[in-house]
Image (cartoon, grey):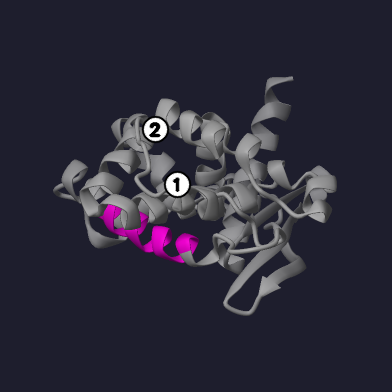
């Protein structure tokens, strides 16, 4: 744990009083011993509250629906996985042998959950203000660059508008796979646009989030194609 503790101190400017909390936060359920599921549950709640507070402060005149979309864009799995990549979380994960062999240290859902577990561990270790400081440190740029206008509309709406504007059929979203336990499921959804011959995939802890993720990937794919 010394290496992980040093990494965390450098990347988040935080040092655990109880390093067992850090070890648990980094331990996936595939590994033996205590895992990070309970810390992830707690960290998710702490993150939701702190990000809600931040978006209210940054957008004092925004309506509730707009605030919800802003918060969702900041706490969704893909954003958390991106944060995990920036911090190098994957290098310090404690995984079972099966997950190691299958590349679990790169799996977005595992990385996202681990980031939330770290937030939960910091909260238990030093309280709300410490957790708030850590979350602010990793979200500062994203908070400063909150999207405006059309970028704030959800990806499914933007994709639908794009296709309708070009007289193309609406996308077909298909459930590909559901994994995980009943209280913590992960959805894998595909997005098909037959007329363009394109298929993308999205993941999320709800079907809606997975569809939004797939739509976002489709918009990026279409954008890349138009640049060629």
Task: State which quarter of the image contains the N terminus.
Answer: top right
Residue at 65%, 56% (x, y): give it.
Answer: 203
In-front residue for pair 26/115: 26
Kindly report which numbered mark, 2 or 1, lies closer to the viewer in this rendering. Answer: 1
Percent of width and height locating residue 223 = 64, 31
- Residue occupied by mark 2: 12
Q: Element under label 2?
A: helix
Give the magenta-colored segment's residue range: 39-52
Residue placed most toward the observer, 166 or 15: 15
Q: Residue at x 46, y 61 (%)?
A: 39
Q: Earlier in the sequence, mark 2 or mark 1?
A: 2
Residue 183: image location, x then y, percent = 57, 77
Q: Residue furthest top?
A: 228
Instruction: Give the structural element (helix, strand or loop) at label 1.
Output: helix
Q: Is residue 46 magenta?
A: yes
Residue 95 lies in the magenta-colored region: no
Q: Is residue 198 among the parts visible in the rendering?
A: no
Q: Nearer the viewer, residue 26 or 1?
A: 1
> What percent of the width, then of the height, locates residue 36?
54, 60
Residue for badge 1: 19
Relative to 187, is 36 on the left or the right? left
Label 2 neighbourhood size at 10 Å, few (<14), some (14-19), many (20+)?
Answer: some
Judge from the rendering whether residue 193 lies leftward or rightward of residue 128; answer left or right: right
Quarter residue 216 falls in: top right
The quadrant where residue 12 appears: top left
**Picture disc at residue 127:** none
């Amino acid at each position: 744990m010394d290496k992980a503790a040093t990494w965390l101190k450098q990347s988040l400017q935080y040092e655990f009083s109880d390093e067992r909390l850090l070890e648990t936060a980094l331990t996936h359920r595939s590994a033996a011993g205590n895992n990070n599921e309970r810390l992830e549950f707690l960290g998710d709640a702490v993150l939701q509250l702190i990000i809600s507070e931040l978006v209210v402060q940054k957008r004092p005149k925004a309506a509730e629906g707009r605030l919800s979309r802003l918060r969702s864009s900041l706490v969704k799995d893909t954003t958390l996985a991106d944060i995990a990549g920036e911090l190098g979380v994957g290098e310090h994960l404690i995984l079972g042998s099966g997950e190691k062999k299958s590349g679990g240290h790169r799996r977005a859902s595992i990385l996202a959950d681990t980031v939330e577990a770290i937030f939960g561990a910091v909260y238990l270790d030093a309280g709300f203000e410490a957790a708030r400081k850590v979350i602010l440190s990793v979200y500062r740029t994203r908070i400063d660059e909150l999207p405006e206008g059309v970028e704030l509309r959800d990806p499914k709406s933007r994709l639908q508008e794009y296709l309708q504007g070009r007289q193309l059929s609406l996308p077909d979203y298909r459930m590909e796979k559901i994994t995980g336990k009943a209280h913590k499921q992960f959805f894998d959804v595909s997005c098909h646009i037959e007329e363009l011959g394109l298929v993308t995939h999205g993941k999320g802890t709800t079907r809606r989030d997975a569809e939004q993720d797939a739509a976002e990937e489709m918009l990026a794919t279409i954008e890349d194609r138009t640049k060629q």
